[in-house]
Image (cartoon, rainbow, N blue to C red):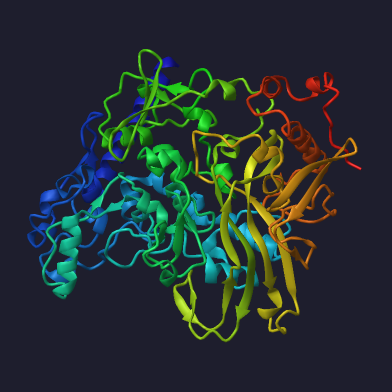
């Protein structure tokens, strides 16, 4: 019986070997031999390609995409078996890497990465579509999953097509050239295409010579992702890219700021005012120093909102006691490739792994003394990763408060937005289909500004967590204008704040009053929030800076009414699990605020409250203490 199973086993092995051999033989241009871990995988039959007969002596390739190793047709396809120009170029892909051709180009060697990208939020845009449909009343939840390519022509879909649908990886790159501030999409090119100065100069000569002077320098396809690759899409909406660099968008025009210090005009003519850059940016860190390939390309799962896909936390690098680590021999294949491409040498050291999903940050390591370091991907500079300061690690009162809530110096604000459909617009451009038509949604913004972030409550099965919030959608939508009704006949008003990580991190934290007695932080909007004591009775009084909006009688920039319950059924967030403070929570915050009227942040009693909370201290009140009355 035993011999029978041994014979069956060997029969299966032999058949498997024959099948593999047949497949390799039948696909000569993509067949390869597997070498040891630190060597290249060399594709066979490169000497048979005819491409280099015309495109000889070209330079500029990245090490891993050199034609000597992978040939030309691995990326560009075409016919390598002929010297005839027309025949050799038949089926050729001039700009490989767009998602429409990625399965036949980049995906041949990187199938796992392509699979992840196709499901990533940067490709599906699920969150943008979901929230837009929810606000337009076309869905009863903002948590359904969508794909931008599947949207049709409903009012919300048309709104996306006219204003938002440019920023997704499926948008095709059709023009030669580097990734710029104006770039959108481009599939793999969006992150991995890099032009040297020589390549840019050669491209200019090629175009000006009516494509007769062939370039000698080829752009590089590599993993050296710069902030410019992120900018085109992430300078929109929550404006993470511009926030990170310290710039706040304005409604000014270029002529308004000529020769003015502290302002700049970007490529699309938007004007920005300098506020304060993120401390990580001052250190020269890139977006990809924190957000590695595991987050940027996704993990293959479909998510609706970005906070579900982003697993990195500040505490992963700025840990409390010891970091979560992983050794080199436990790295996944993707991480090993990044490690090799960047020529890192710390094989013998533990690396930080993100606590939530254990994905590694291969540009980090822990030395023999237990000190943590990050290797900057821009310049290779070694950055010490400081653990949490004592005040953070021992603070029990704020253990459910996100790091960004206290450590963000400012965030963008947008109010007074009005959306209206202009049925007579003759050159309406569909950002998804890249076609002109008639009729277009137009957005009019009253004001861009900045302030310290407001605070909101993320409440779900994991508990309650305080996070930064911004007035992302205080707006009116004239839905009737799309369906042919008279202007103003069918208008909906929305007062929605959105959870937001501003990416304006500072080492200094906001002071206690900026949370516990700041009107904008608590959701009332800008204004004067005073603690008044009359005849031994303390009372909080708020005077708003903005006039009341006639749609709901709240200040234009407010999130909630001052110490009043929000009406049942009122939607005030772009997430079902994110909300403003309840009245009881507002009272708790303002109670501490009343104590801060006399006690300084660093006083013994306020420091003690960080460890034990405020309630034990209320049992030992001094006779001079006057707590607020809520009547």
- Which residue is located at x 84 percent, y 49 percent? 565
On the rendered structure, is 19 left or right of 620?
Answer: left
**Above or below — where is 73 with respect to 436?**
above
- Which residue is located at x 56 percent, y 38 percent? 404
Name the one closer to the observer, 353 or 266: 266
Name the one closer to the observer, 39 or 175: 175
Q: Position of residue 586 (x, y in %)?
A: 78, 41
Determine the image quadrant of residue 334: top left
Determine the image quadrant of residue 547: bottom right
On the rendered structure, is 587 left or right of 249?
Answer: right
Q: Position of residue 68 (x, y in %)?
A: 14, 46
On the rendered structure, is 121 left or right of 488?
Answer: left
- Which residue is located at x 79 percent, y 63 percent? 552
Quadrant where the C terminus sits is top right
Quadrant where the N terminus sits is top left
Q: Is residue 262 visible?
A: yes
Q: Position of residue 343 (x, y in %)?
A: 25, 32
Q: Is residue 15 visible?
A: no
Determine the image quadrant of residue 6: top left
- Which residue is located at x 57 percent, y 86 percent? 424
Q: Position of residue 87 (x, y in %)?
A: 17, 69
**Above or below — where is 187 with respect to 467?**
below
């Amino acid at each position: 019986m035993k011999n029978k199973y041994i014979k069956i086993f060997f029969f299966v092995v032999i058949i498997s070997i024959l099948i593999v051999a047949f497949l390799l033989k039948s696909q000569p241009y993509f067949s390869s031999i597997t070498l040891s871990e630190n060597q290249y995988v060399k594709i066979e039959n490169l000497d048979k390609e005819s491409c280099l007969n015309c495109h000889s002596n070209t330079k500029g390739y990245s090490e891993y995409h050199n034609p000597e190793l992978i040939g030309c047709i691995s990326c560009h396809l075409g016919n390598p078996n002929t010297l005839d120009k027309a025949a050799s170029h038949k089926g050729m892909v001039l700009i490989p890497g767009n998602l429409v051709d990625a399965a036949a180009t980049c995906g041949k060697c990187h199938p796992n990465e392509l699979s992840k990208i196709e499901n990533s939020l940067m490709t599906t845009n699920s969150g943008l579509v979901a929230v837009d449909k929810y606000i337009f009343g076309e869905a009863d939840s903002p948590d359904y999953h969508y794909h931008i390519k599947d949207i049709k022509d409903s009012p919300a879909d048309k709104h996306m097509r006219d204003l938002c649908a440019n920023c997704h990886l499926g948008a095709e790159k059709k023009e030669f050239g580097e990734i710029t501030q104006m770039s959108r999409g481009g599939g793999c090119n969006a992150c991995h295409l890099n032009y040297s100065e020589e390549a840019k100069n050669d491209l200019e000569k090629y175009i000006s010579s009516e494509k007769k002077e062939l370039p000698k320098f080829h752009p590089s396809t590599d993993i050296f992702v710069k902030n410019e690759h992120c900018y085109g899409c992430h300078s929109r909406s929550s404006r993470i890219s511009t926030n990170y660099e310290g710039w706040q968008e304005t409604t000014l025009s270029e002529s308004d700021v000529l020769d003015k210090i502290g302002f700049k005009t970007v490529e699309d003519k938007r004007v920005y005012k300098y506020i304060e850059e993120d401390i990580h940016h001052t250190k020269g860190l890139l977006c990809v120093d924190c957000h590695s390939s595991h987050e940027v390309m996704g993990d293959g799962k479909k998510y609706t909102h970005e906070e579900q896909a982003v697993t990195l936390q500040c505490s992963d690098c700025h840990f409390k006691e010891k970091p979560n680590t992983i050794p080199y021999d436990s790295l996944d294949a993707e991480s090993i490739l990044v490690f090799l491409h960047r020529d890192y040498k710390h094989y013998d050291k533990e690396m930080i792994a993100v606590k939530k999903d254990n994905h590694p940050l291969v540009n980090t390591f822990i030395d023999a003394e237990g000190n943590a370091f990050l290797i900057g991907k821009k310049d290779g500079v070694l950055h010490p990763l400081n653990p949490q300061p004592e005040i953070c690690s021992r603070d029990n009162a704020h253990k459910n408060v996100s790091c960004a809530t206290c450590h963000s110096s400012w965030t963008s604000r947008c109010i007074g937005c009005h959306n209206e459909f202009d049925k007579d617009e003759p050159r309406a451009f569909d950002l998804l289909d890249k076609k002109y038509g008639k009729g277009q949604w137009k957005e009019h913004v009253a004001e861009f500004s900045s302030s310290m972030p407001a605070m909101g409550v993320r409440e779900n099965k994991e508990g309650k967590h305080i996070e930064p919030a911004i007035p992302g959608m205080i707006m009116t939508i004239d839905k009737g204008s799309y369906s042919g009704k008279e202007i103003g006949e069918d208008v909906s008003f929305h007062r929605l704040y959105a959870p937001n990580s501003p990416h304006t991190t500072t080492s200094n934290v906001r002071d206690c009053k900026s949370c516990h007695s700041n009107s904008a932080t608590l959701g009332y909007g800008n204004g004067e929030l005073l603690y008044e004591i009359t005849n031994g009775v303390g009372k909080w009084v708020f005077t708003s800076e903005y006039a009341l909006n006639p749609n709901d009688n709240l200040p234009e920039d407010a999130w909630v009414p001052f110490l009043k319950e929000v009406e049942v059924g009122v939607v005030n967030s772009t997430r079902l699990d994110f909300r403003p403070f309840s009245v009881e929570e507002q009272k708790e915050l303002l109670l501490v605020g009343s104590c801060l009227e006399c006690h300084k942040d660093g006083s013994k009693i306020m420091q003690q409250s960080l460890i034990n909370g405020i309630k034990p201290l209320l049992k030992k009140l001094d006779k001079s203490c006057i707590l607020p009355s809520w009547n």
